[in-house]
Amino acid sequence: MTGREILHKMKEKVGLSSSADSGKGKSKMSRNITHGFHLVKAKSHHDMEDYVVAQFKEVDDNELGLFAIFDGHLSHVIPDYLRSHLFDTILKEPNFWTEPENAMRRAYRITDTKILEKAGDLGRGGSTAVTAILINCQKLVVANVGDSRVVMCKNGVAKQLSVDHEPSTEREDIENRGGFVSTFPGDVPRVDGQLAVARAFGDKNLKEHLSSEPDVAMEMIDDDTDCIILASDGLWKVMSNQEAVDTIKNIKDARSAAKRLTEEALNRRSSDDISCVVVKFQ
């Protein structure tokens, strides 16, 4: 086995990945719950800027499913930093087990502050994020900033759990902070004419006008839950929530499902990096 193959196996085992890659895993608490992920790089000259976390982790007598998509802009360093640090920060919050939603909000704020403090080392740019924590196979807590998205499917019906933070919908807040939203150059609304999302980690030069406050949601897992999908906007730009769940409804293997979604996004001519995590409840 080559060194590259050994590194790939190590990364797959712990659920960390970047670049064109894939992996899978399963819950020890419930054999019916599996996950898979797949990433493909866009046809662009910059480095891959999407990073994924997908793993089950035992903490004391509990099991946590940790899933995330970090989609960088003008940077692959900051999403990689988030991949390495954000979940650790969340789990260190003293009220995580009693108030996981509040713990995630606080951890997002703490992490963004650290990124801004380390701007000299981490460089410019920033990253969107969507995180989902599955607690003991029963409770799903989701948080996000930006336009990566998590969708749950119950009885074949898609339900979006995250919020797309678009400059056009948050124009008033941006303007109240002293910024502006412009579609020049191009036709996409951008904060100060630069960034096409209204919330993100990093982006020190825009931070006065840009929020890093996450939206947080909680859902219970029941017998009607089919799957959850986390994906970067490279998928959602070309596919609706219902189209995504319909695409994988007959695919039992979670990694095959994630790969199928990225392939469909490419078939629909998505030009962005595409990363996808699928969690199957069978």
Image (cartoon, rainbow, N blue to C red):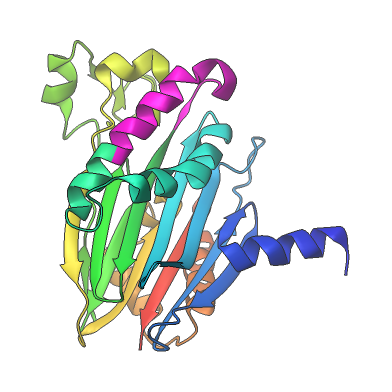
Q: Quadrant of residue 241?
A: bottom left
> For the image shown, how many numbered marks are present on the structure?
0
Magenta-drawn stretch, dominant element (helix, strand or loop): helix
Residue 148 seen from this side:
no
In the picture, the quarter occupied by the N terminus is bottom right
In the picture, the quarter occupied by the C terminus is bottom left
Q: Residue at x 12, y 16 (%)?
A: 176
Q: Residue at x 45, y 82 (%)?
A: 28
Q: Quadrant of residue 4?
A: bottom right
In the rendered view, tell whether residue 102 sits above or below residue 78.
Answer: below
| Residue 100 on image: x %, y % | 22, 54
Using the image as rendered, state which of residue 149 and residue 222 is in the foreground.
222
Query: Is 244 left, or right, of 152 in this rendering?
Result: right
Using the image as rendered, state which of residue 208 and residue 269 is in the foreground.
208
| Residue 224 on image: x %, y % | 20, 85
Query: Is 234 left, or right, of 196 in this rendering?
Result: right
| Residue 116 on image: x %, y % | 42, 21
Q: Residue furthest right?
A: 2
The part of the chain drawn in magenta is 107-126
Query: Is 226 left, or right, of 33 in this rendering?
Result: left
Does the magenta segment cover residue 222? no
Using the image as rendered, state which of residue 82 and residue 58 is in the foreground.
58
Does the magenta segment cover residue 116? yes
